[in-house]
Image: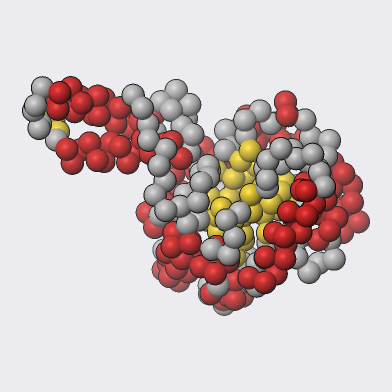
């Protein structure tokens, strides 16, 4: 069965169901993230690293070997653009095996373009075989307001990330009080999703900063983000990875069912039949459209029935 990889008008990309933050000073934790099944790891140079430890964290990025993370993609959250760490961060990220840079607290299109041009400059003077992707974190009211402009300013921008966790940057900037129902953040999440899709970007939500408690509420938040249209979630603990993977990606059973539907319809159409019975259910062209959409989504996550 051939799975279409067409992604409509979105930028060419791989979608991630789960993106797990790991401090760049704790690279030994990479194996835990890989074993947990995370689709991507975000190595953090910003909030999780003390000022005095940032040089060592940058140096550590260059020591990562391919065997350390297998086929799990590595991204790096740099420090804020105007933090004074811009050039050192970019130099270290370009010299690392990481595939993308995560830009925190993005607000200005001009600043983001400057950053991307700086990345290009460092890449031209390096031995990198693959250009860095850019993932934009919207953590302020101004950043969220400029979601479309930030997402569409350069073809390298692959995703927009935002979070609505209690005491987080977005909550402080916008001023809302988080509740379990999520009504106070529904507009913000929906707005970023709409603007991101219009810009051709994936969207990722941070839905929980708790560890060891509030798991049921976290699952509700994950499902809300999925229902809105988010592609995945950023996470802070390996124990959250399974829930995110289960929520956002098609399951092995769904992929296998979609493949059976398309195979049955191909046979039916070859016999000039428009509908047929499959496993006790009548299926026709409409079911084929849904099945192909499931396989296209699986393809965007690089999933097959045997790899979930």
**Towards the viewer: 286 or 215:** 286
Along the line of sight, the residue nearer the viewer: 191 or 127? 127
Count of numbered circles in the view: 0
Q: Quadrant of residue 108?
A: bottom right
Q: Residue at x 58, y 75 (%)?
A: 141
> Looking at this rendering, what residue extends furthest in the front direction?
124
Observer able to see residue 219: yes
Residue 62 % position (x, y): 83, 39
Measuring 37% from the left and 35% from the top, which residue is drawn there? 4
Figure check: 164 above or below 301: below
For this view, does 227 lie left or right of residue 171? left
On the image, the x and y values in percent for residue 5 come to 42, 38
Q: Position of residue 17 (x, y in %)?
A: 51, 43
The residue drawn where x is 63% and y is 38% is 73
Q: Is residue 215 left or right of residue 135?
A: left
Is 236 located above or below residue 273 in the figure? Answer: below
Residue 78, relative to residue 179: is it above or below? above
For the point 78% across and 69% down, the residue is 82
Q: Is residue 7 left or right of residue 103?
A: left
Q: Which color scheme is applied?
A: secondary structure
Q: Report x, y in % for residue 190.
A: 42, 65
Instruction: Answer left or right for 72 relative to 273.
Output: right
The N terminus - image quarter: top left
Q: Is residue 207 visible?
A: no
């Amino acid at each position: 069965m051939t799975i279409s990889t067409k992604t409509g008008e979105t930028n060419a990309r791989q979608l991630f169901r789960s993106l797990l933050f790991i401090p760049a000073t704790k690279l030994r934790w990479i194996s835990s993230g890989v074993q947990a099944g995370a689709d991507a790891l975000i190595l953090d140079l910003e909030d999780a690293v003390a000022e005095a430890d940032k040089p060592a964290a940058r140096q550590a990025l260059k020591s990562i070997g391919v065997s350390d993370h297998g086929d799990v993609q590595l991204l790096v959250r740099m420090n804020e653009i105007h933090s004074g760490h811009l050039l050192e961060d970019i130099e270290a990220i370009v010299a690392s095996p990481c595939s993308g840079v995560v830009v925190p607290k993005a607000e200005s299109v001009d600043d983001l373009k400057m950053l991307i041009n700086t990345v290009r400059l460092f890449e031209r003077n390096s031995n990198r075989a693959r250009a860095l992707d850019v993932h934009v974190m919207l953590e302020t009211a101004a950043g969220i307001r400029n979601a479309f402009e930030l997402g569409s300013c350069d073809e390298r921008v692959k995703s927009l990330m935002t979070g609505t966790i209690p005491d987080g940057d977005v909550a402080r900037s916008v001023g809302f009080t988080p509740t379990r129902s999520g009504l106070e953040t529904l507009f913000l999440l929906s707005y970023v999703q709409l603007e991101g899709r219009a810009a051709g970007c994936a969207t990722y939500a941070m839905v929980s900063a708790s560890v060891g408690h509030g798991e049921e509420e976290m699952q509700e938040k994950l499902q809300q983000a999925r229902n809105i249209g988010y592609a995945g979630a950023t996470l802070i603990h390996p124990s959250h990875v399974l829930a995110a993977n289960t929520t956002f990606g098609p399951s092995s059973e769904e992929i296998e069912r979609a493949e059976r539907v398309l195979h049955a319809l191909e046979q039916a159409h070859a016999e000039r039949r428009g509908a047929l019975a499959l496993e006790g259910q009548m299926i026709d062209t409409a079911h084929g459209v849904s099945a192909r959409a499931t396989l296209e989504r699986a393809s965007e996550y690089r999933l097959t029935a045997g790899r979930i």
